[in-house]
Amino acid sequence: MNKRILCVDDDLNILRGFKRTLRGKFNISTSSSGPEALALMQESEPFAVVVSDMRMPEMNGVQFLTRVKEISPDSVRVMLTGNSDQQTATDAVNEGAIFRFLTKPCPPELFAQTLNSALEQYGLITAERELLQGTLNRSLQVLVDILALVNSTAFTRSTRVKRMAGDMANGLGISNVWEIEIAAMLSQIGCVTVPEHILLKVLNGDEVNDEELNLYQKHPQVASELISKIPRLERIAGMISNQNRRFKDDPESQLLLTDVAAENLGARILKIVLDFNKLLESNELPDVAFKELNNRNSWYDPEVLNALKKLIEERSDEFTSKEVHVSELKAGMILEQSLLSSNDTLLLSEGQEITHSLIMKLVNFSEANVIPEIVNVRVPVNGHLQS
């Protein structure tokens, strides 16, 4: 478990005292001002506990801990101050959502005990979040896999874009990667309301009338309305609702990336990933597809677009082509051919990532002689596949 602690005080003697008293017991970092500490937090791994003095120049303790709550909500916050008036305590609790309020001078034993309690609280917070994220992610993946079995036209792209969106979010240093992955995974769920013949026409680039196009274009809002009813997925619903919005139409387009609301940042990533994937589906090479995106003026966030460029460069030699027997398929492989039934019905699209449920489907099809026993796939060069 993360046991990093950040102590912030404008009195250097107190900071030295922290290090001297707590040496060998805790992993302590120090900072002499709120702005300096915030910069440190932006550049480093998360801190489990943040301790702040109240009275500091530039930014007082309440202001600082309020910002900490915004940029690192899991960090447990402790206020240490010589000012013990009721208003200070009230502001610290209400605005900074602190875990403990300690008054100077604080006995070393009490301070160490408080830090231990704060670390335990951090462990509870992160364990609950990781359990929620893991359970939710796996449950939703099963749902999407089932939908892909029923309607491969819409849901094959969900598995393709999830990994890309997650990798881009990691490359941008975003903390809520799991939300963006789930948003990508559920980005097509509104397509359940679109007749499959219309989906095929749109995705194949065939001509559609205004009524058909309007029906298709509503699917992100349909998905958003469905997902918003699930507790704790409200931000994900917001990302999906705006997944087709261009960057120039984003109300926060002038803000620094670090100040953009999670919903808007997630929508920007989805916009690029979905558009890029659509070009790949039309058999564009990754480099060519990226150039086309780059030529679309003001459609995409430049920083997010640059993250895609880096991802393409990193992945250029990540996969190798291979022929495998259906019984040898493993989750994580990528189909290098579309699979058609004996009557030419599309079963699975080229570029779809193999999942455990799809393996079962393909094995059944192979045993029924619906598809050939040998299929062409792309396999990660590093060999990292799920068994």
Image (cartoon, grey):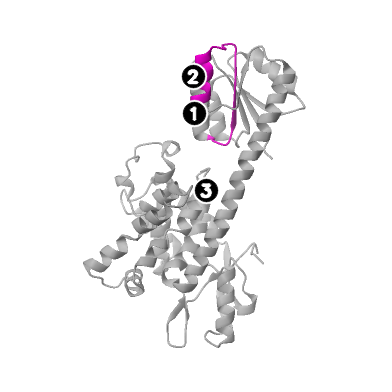
Q: Which residue is located at x 52 percent, y 72 percent?
A: 335
The crowding category of the residue bearing disc 2, from other C-alpha atoms within 10 Å (few below 14, some 14 to 19, many at least 20), is some
Asked whether the beta carbons under mark 1 and mark 2 sit within 8 Å of each other, the answer is yes
* Residue 88, placed above or below residue 275: above
* Residue 370, placed above or below residue 118: below
Indicate the position of residue 21 as horizontal and vertical percent values.
74, 19
Amino acid at circle 1: Arg
The crowding category of the residue bearing disc 3, from other C-alpha atoms within 10 Å (few below 14, some 14 to 19, many at least 20), is some
Amino acid at circle 2: Met
* Residue 252, placed above or below residue 92: below
Q: Which residue was labeled with disc 3?
A: 177
Q: Which residue was labeled with disc 2?
A: 59
At numbered mark 3, what does the secondary structure look like: helix, strand or loop? helix
User: Reading the chain from its start, which is encountered first: label 3 or label 1?
Assistant: 1
Q: Which residue was labeled with disc 1?
A: 67
Q: In which quarter of the image is residue 208?
A: bottom left
> Is residue 144 rendered magenta in the image?
no
Residues rendered magenta in the picture: 72-94
Q: How far apart are labels 3 and 1 at the CA level?
A: 20 Å
Q: Which residue is located at x 48 percent, y 69 percent?
A: 148
Q: In which quarter of the image is residue 374?
A: bottom right
At numbered mark 1, what does the secondary structure look like: helix, strand or loop? helix
Amino acid at circle 3: Val
